Image (tube, rainbow, N blue to C red):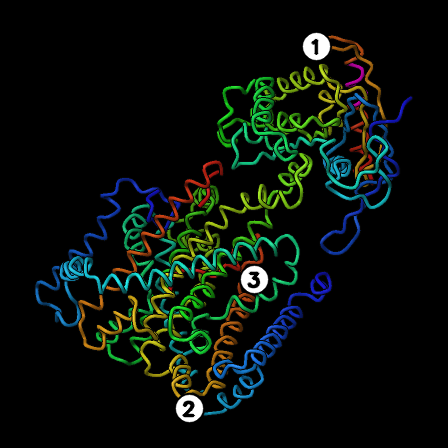
Amino acid sequence: MSASNIFAGERLRGTAASVLPLALILLAWEAVCRAGLVAPTLLPAPSVVLLRWIALLPDPDFLHHVAQTMIRLLSGFAIALAAGVSIGLLASRGGGGLLEPVIRVLAPIPKIALYPAFVLIFGFDHASKIALVVADAVFPILLATFHGARSVEPKLLWSAWAAGASRRATIFTVVLPSALPSILTGCKIALLISCVTVFLAEMISSTDGLGHLLIRSARSFRIVDMFVPLVTISTIGLLLNAALVAVRNRLLVGHGNHR
Amino acid sequence: MSEPMIAIQGLTKRFSTADGRKHLAIDDVNVEVAEGEFVSILGPSGCGKSTLLYMVGGFVAPSAGAITVQGRPVTGPGPDRGPVFQEFALFPWKTVLENVMYGLRQQGVSKAEAEARARALLDMVHLKDFADFYPKELSGGMRQRVAIARTLAYQPQILLMDEPFGALDAHTRTVLQNELLGIWERDRKTVLFVTHGVDEAVFLSDRVVVMTRAPGRIKKVVEIDLPRPRVRAELLVNRRYQEYIVELEQLIEDVHLEAAGA
Amino acid sequence: MKSALRKLGPAASTVLSLGALLVLWEILARLAQIDGFPPATEALVQVPLILGERESLASIGASLWRMFLGGALALCFAVPVGLAMGRNKRIAQALNPVLTAAYPIPKAALMPIIMLWFGVGDLSKVLVIFLGVSLPLIYHSFHGAHAVDEKLLWSAMAMGMKPVARLFKVVLPSALPDVLLGCRVGLAMALIVMISSEMIARQSGAGDLLFNALDMALYGDVYAMIVILAAIGFVLDWVFERVRRRLVHWAESRQDAMVPGGGV
């Protein structure tokens, strides 16, 4: 399965065949721009965007914005991961009856609406954006952990208890590994949500970061510079997703085939 | 007779169904199993025989009655009673060797010693060369061998076997029955063996407990007085063996008829 | 406490936990004493005031209407595409890389670009919602159609059912649990894209109201708007979940039905 293949389950034969449609779209886009069918102030050619992107990559100012975004993205995701897995595990071993209705209330709330509140409470700097990333990313991880831990084959637990493992020991030696495929699926969703959330937060109110770059470029109608942050955050998303898939393949060697 | 290894008295189990009604799964079962005895519980599916075994294992709590193991009441699972499940219940994220080592490690045995003992057991179940495989890479018969080795590793006094060969093909099943008998005849653990196979029960057991269905009660206990060590080819032409098979088949048939009539 | 909650049933326990969260908010806010974090009571009294105001009510209504339009368009477009992908390898191969590339792009972030193209009117806002909803819908429809039991299709073929009839009489019903799961994710997505694109564009709508209140330091109004948007999210999800359960009561319950997900 190709690492960046979000629509998993279908093994695609040959990378050439799988990249071809995308290449065709880009080529058509390029051709339309070169032929002068659209104003370059409205839609820049992909080659122009790419060249601009490559030119910016070594630029320290640009890298500073990338770094700000990454700090928020990764710390938010890390906090969501730690909180989601521990709360999910705890809730699955008891207390689930208390937690479930709370999640039922909180999960469907559009977290982005909380952003103004986070700004008011945590200020305009890193903290409010990290808080938003946590609020958005924690639910997929928490729910995936909870369901994964709940659906542990009871006979695995029985086997461990009969072998003399304590209840606490089985949380780490049986429940957590059993729930791992589910947790990683939750992480995959959460990681993508984190990328999107941090970018939107930076667009809405920020003085730095990739999202801010897009807004800054939009204010002066620099269309090429508007595409660059979008391409960057999407690339970051795909790379992080590929990294997660690699980690997953490492961790799940023994597990059967999981999506 | 000395104190029984397992004593089950007035054991009863009720389940609540989804619509809130009570379902009587096991009703007033009394059994005693002596140390070193191989006892099968034979009955049609849905007679609660697995539930009975789970209660002895301490995985499921009885609604009424008492189970004692070596005179001590069962309050939960413990390493004196090792389960072997039809579904194997191997840890899929651990290799064969790690699975067998698990119980020993949980009991604080050093890694080196646990590994040595696990390897010896794998040798015994003919899986020496598969130590580093993952369960998913093994056939059903091999997986069940691993599960048996994993349970034997922490040396339980009692083996609780829940239709352990039920998911295997006919040939593998006979091979594993022979191997189990070989292992048992060497160290004579107490075995409680749940099955719905008449020939399997007769071939392996000292006694067969036949159960009725809905609710599960003991219909009859049949002593299997056949010489050991048992060899399948010899038994097949043994008159007494044949008579046991016929008797038990008849009993199972009666159970089905009673259930249909009820 | 735990068993008591369970006995109460889901509806009562939801109401109870909602109450508990509001009480928690009230206590935290009174303890924290921050201007930007007013107690629940101060925010809640603003809710009827905002909803009673013609202008803000119309603004929220317009937002919901755009959301409905974008969602409906996405439904008509994405479900057939997803089903076709799930049943036809060539279509899947052709669209897969395109969708994979599009997946991590924050859809609401396209707002400034789309506004350059189509202006600041409704068209841009509906379009961005359409984009946001389409991807999860295609994804889940694809999975649903892909997982259709081959033997069901063989039986239909043996009965002489034609390909188009098979798509609507076998594939769609079989995939319905997944499609509806996609709709639920899509619904959440529509709301998120709606709010964030309005926050970015700052032209009109619920997201704009929210930030206007923030700019004017009307903290009670900010939190009241958050409560309103949260309530919209909760109610839409609750209603849809009832509908979904009714439509696919025959399917085995799915655990991931609670997982919200997908990109924005």
Residue that carries the numbered disc 3 in the rendered image: C245
Q: Which mark is residue C55?
A: 2
Mark 1: amino acid: Val
The kind of secondary structure element at disc 3 is helix
In this rendered view, identify the residue nearer to me: B186 or A19. Answer: B186
Distance Cα–Cα, label 2 vs label 1: 91 Å
Question: Residue B240, percent across and down?
Answer: 80, 11
- Residue C256 in picture, x, y percent from top left: 52, 55
Q: Is residue A94 something that shows in the picture?
A: yes
Q: Is-magenta flag for residue B247?
A: yes
Q: Earlier in the sequence, mark 2 or mark 3?
A: 2
Instruction: Report the span colored magenta.
Output: B242-248
Helix, strand or loop for disc 2: helix
Q: Who's the residue at 42% across and 78% down the image?
A: C64
Question: Which mark lies nearer to you, 1 or 3?
Answer: 1
Residue shown at 49% from the left, 88% from the top? C51
